[in-house]
Image (spheres, helix red, strand yellow):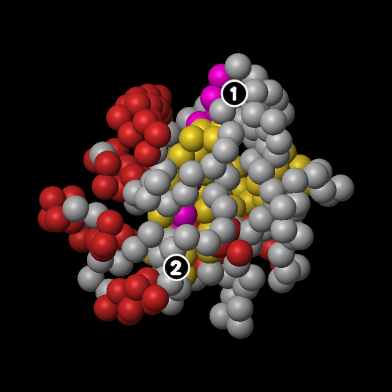
Amino acid sequence: MLTETDRRQLDDVGCLLLPGVMPPEVLAALRRRTDELFEEEGALAGSEFKQEPGARRLANLVNKGRIFEEIILTPRVLECMAHILGPRFKLSSLNARSTEPHSESDQPLHADSGAISDEAGYFVANSVWLLDDFTAENGATRFVAGSHRWRRLPEPEFHHPHPEQQLAIAKAGDVIVMNAHMWHGGTANRTGAPRRALHVYYTRWDQPQQQHQKRWLSTEVQARLSPEARRILALDDPLNDAVSATGSGKSGFMK
């Protein structure tokens, strides 16, 4: 499904917009379940991964609704992941981030998990599922095109605008795929409504998962998963158990 132009965009810029990945009924279901979880978890929301001033978070979402089990297998997104990461990759985590209304500052520029590509190439890639429009006013992700190729990280706590940064402006229902080595970060939400997004985050087969799925998923969820879902979650992979057990699973930001 990827065109040659799409591949060049991922290679050169580091991100690609996939319009309309979520049909209206899927978008509505994801919004509904995400809002339910924010309400149910309250002050503990996101505590399995991280919490953040100015934003609400959720973590371990594959374990919290069948709708999340389904989206990790979206073919258009998986094709992009294979292009960035190579043919063998797995889900690293599925989290949510909702930038609070009237937030005060931009999220620092970062590469996810503090990742710098190694001799085997890139090993982290993200897909941002827009539950709300991303606009210049409500906290759209900023990114520095081509920075995934620089093989270095931005200065810590780089909150101020980068001279080459752009904004990822898109519509609810779209998905933005990113080479997560690219410098990026959320921006301040100057509106009166939250800006919600899901982060369906993948990593190369030989790297630890951000959240070790086999440990975090309930036995009930694991028992009902399809073979394809078990494969993308690396539930039956002894190598994944070894590398994810030793990885921290806590490093880096997610927009």
Q: Position of residue 94 (x, y in %)?
A: 40, 49
Q: Earlier in the sequence, mark 1 or mark 2?
A: 1
Q: In the rendered image, is residue 4 in sight?
A: no
Range drawn in magenta: 193-202
Disc marking residue 248: 2
Label 2, residues with CA under 10 Å away: few <14, some 14-19, many ≥20: some
Drawn side of residue 224 relative to residue 39, left or right: left
Which residue lies at the image location 26% right of the left edge and 62% below the top edge? Answer: 215
Q: Is residue 216 magenta?
A: no
For residue 170, which quarter of the picture? top right
Q: What residue type is labelled 2?
A: Ser
Disc marking residue 101: 1
Q: What residue type is labelled 1?
A: Pro
Residue 72, compared with residue 172, is above or below; it is: below
Q: Which of 212 and 237 is in front in this view?
A: 212
Which residue lies at the image location 47% right of the left edge and 60% below the top edge? Answer: 250
